[in-house]
Amino acid sequence: VQLQASGGGLVQTGESLRLSCKASGINFRIYDMNWYRQPPGKQREWVAGITSGGSANYIDAVKGRFTVSRDNIWRRAYLQIDQLKPEDTAVYYCQTRHSGADVWGQGTQVTVSS
């Protein structure tokens, strides 16, 4: 089982990024997928998730700017981040649970300059 996150980068305030998480080794369509982020010097926090049925949830701080989606054919989850702010600077991770254990992608760095 493997998750591979990509799509991060260095952007300016107000720009957008689309993060991607590619899953392998699982029947992707039956798994809930989550996105977390870890800002510099802070703890990792959950920011968004999408259920196997396609229902999306977000923390209040990102509602209206973050959009989580999935493509079951290509076994990918996505996190669209619009109107990026400096406080969005973090390493972003995708996550799921498999056989009772958390599975994490390697993280992708998002840096927003002011």
Image (tube, rainbow, N blue to C red):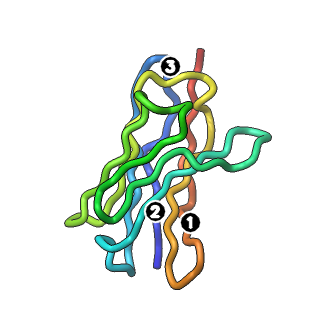
- Residue ID at (65%, 48%): 45
Q: Amino acid at mark 2?
A: Gln
Neighbour class for label 1 at 10 Å: few (<14), some, many (≥20)? some
Q: Position of residue 55 (x, y in %)?
A: 33, 53
Asked if residue 75 can be seen in this view, the reply is yes
In which quarter of the view is residue 29 placed? Answer: bottom left
Mark 1 and mark 2: Cα distance apart in space: 8 Å
Of the image marks 1 and 3, the number of the one nearer the N terminus: 3
Lateral position of residue 27 relative to residue 99, left or right? left
How far is disc 3 from disc 2 in space, using C-alphas? 25 Å
Circle 2 packing at 10 Å, graded few (<14), some (14-19), many (20+), is: some
The amino acid at mark 1 is: Trp
Q: Residue, x 41% and y 57% (percent of image)? A: 21
Note whether 101 is above or below 112 in the view shown. Answer: below
Q: Nearer the viewer, residue 29 or 18?
A: 29
Q: Is residue 70 above or below residue 9?
A: below
Whichever of labels 3 and 2 marks the residue nearer the N terminus, that label is 2
Element type at marker 2?
strand
Farthest residue in the top direction?
Answer: 114
What is the number of the mark on residue 104? 1
Coordinates of residue 54 in the picture (x, y in percent): 29, 56
Outermost residue, left side = 73
Circle 3: residue type? Gln
The residue indicated by pointer 3 is 12
* Residue at the bottom extreme, as displayed: 99
Reply above or below: 92 against 74. above
Mark 2 — residue? 4
The disc, 1 or 2, on the residue closer to the chain's N-terminal end is: 2
Asked whether 25 or 45 is in front, the reply is 45
Residue 17 occupies quadrant: top left
- Tell me the quarter of the picture where residue 74 sits: bottom left
Instruction: Report x, y in % for residue 51.
Output: 37, 60
